[in-house]
Image: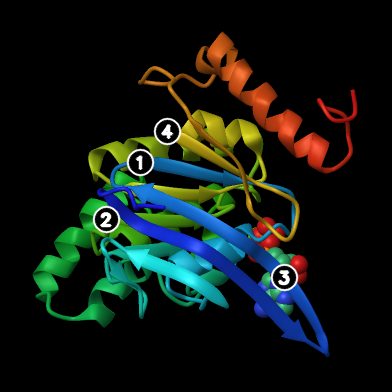
Amino acid sequence: MNRRSNAVLGVRGLRKSFSAAGATTVALNGVDLDIEAGSFVSIVGPSGCGKSTLLQIMAGLASATSGDVFHKQSRMHEPPPDVVYVFQQYTRSLFPWKTVERNVAFGLESKGGMSRADVAARTREMIGLVKLTGFERHYPWQLSGGMQQRVAIARALACRPSVLLMDEPFSAVDALTRAGLQELLRSLWREMNLTVVFVTHDVDEGIYLSTRVVALTRAPGTVAIDLPVELRDPRDQIATRALPAYLDYRARLLAQLFADEGLGGPEAA
Ligand SMILES: Nc1ncnc2c1ncn2[C@@H]1O[C@H](COP(=O)(O)OP(=O)(O)O)[C@@H](O)[C@H]1O
Ligand SMILES: [Mg+2]
């Protein structure tokens, strides 16, 4: 299979197995996927199907058992510097002893090469972009869950990456906070010309956010559906979710996921 020419990340024939306590678990069993520059791709699938494993391999944080992993047109050998990864558990990814400002500046300072004034200016800009101006001197534990996740996003984006990988980043917040974070992420994606790969177990979140939704099968994961999402922009939390096209995407993805679990859908009908 040829690679898409504008792909920033890609995997070919990707297999990943884990050996632990004498048993081998196959997490991914032959995944082909190209992520095109500028796209917003959600990956959905049942728990344990290999979503996190796939994302970690695309970030260069884990190795494939077999198959090829690409960054742009080259084979990936180490985590690419223009790709950042936001973990699911923001409470673990922020430093509790550092203020919002120090957390956001951390990546810039540890990378080096920027003057103190430039670090301060970029930190201020990022805090503004995630709408936390006024909270610079707060500590993570003084903030709500949604605000902490915004700090984690600001820190990840401070070095101006081109690709943002996120693993179920909004699963631990309430529904209203979650909608706010979705809007923020869509606006950052547009304003910063990002490519986003977003893992979620929530089909609705995947469709609403994305230009494309990829559904994996139950473990060992392979690609079950690769669905371009053609919904008008700007999107709206209420109107977009009521469009016939949106409901059609939703029905197709849920039918696949439910059939895979033996919960109805076309197979069981
Ligand atoms: N480090 C690991 N060691 C052993 N097994 C693992 C490891 N990471 C993941 N797995 C297994 O691989 C499969 C896929 O896991 P994961 O990628 O976390 O799935 P998902 O994110 O879709 O829930 C699961 O069966 C899981 O138990
Ligand atoms: Mg996971």
Inter-mark Cα distance, 2 to 4: 17 Å
| Residue at which label 3 appears | 26
Instruction: Tell which of 173 and 5 is nearer to you.
Output: 5
Inter-mark Cα distance, 4 to 1: 6 Å
Say which mark, if any, is on residue 211.
4
Residue 255 lies in quadrant: top right
Specify few, some or many for label 3: CA neighbours under 10 Å numbering under 14, 14-19, or 20 or more.
some
Specify few, some or many for label 1: CA neighbours under 10 Å numbering under 14, 14-19, or 20 or more.
many
Say which mark, if any, is on residue 39.
1
Nearest to N terminus: mark 3 or mark 2 = 3
Say which mark, if any, is on residue 127.
none
Q: Residue 253: in sight, yes or no?
A: yes
Task: Check whether the beta carbons of the residues at disc 3 and disc 2 lie within 8 A of each other.
Answer: no
Nearest to N terminus: mark 4 or mark 1 = 1
| Amino acid bearing label 1 | Ser
Inter-mark Cα distance, 2 to 1: 11 Å
- The x, y position of residue 146, in whole percent, is 53, 48
Inter-mark Cα distance, 3 to 1: 29 Å
| Amino acid bearing label 3 | Val
| Residue at which label 2 appears | 162
Write the residue at 52% across / 63% down: 13
Q: Is mark 3 within 8 Å of ligand 1?
A: no
Task: Check whether the beta carbons of the residues at disc 4 and disc 1 lie within 8 A of each other.
Answer: yes
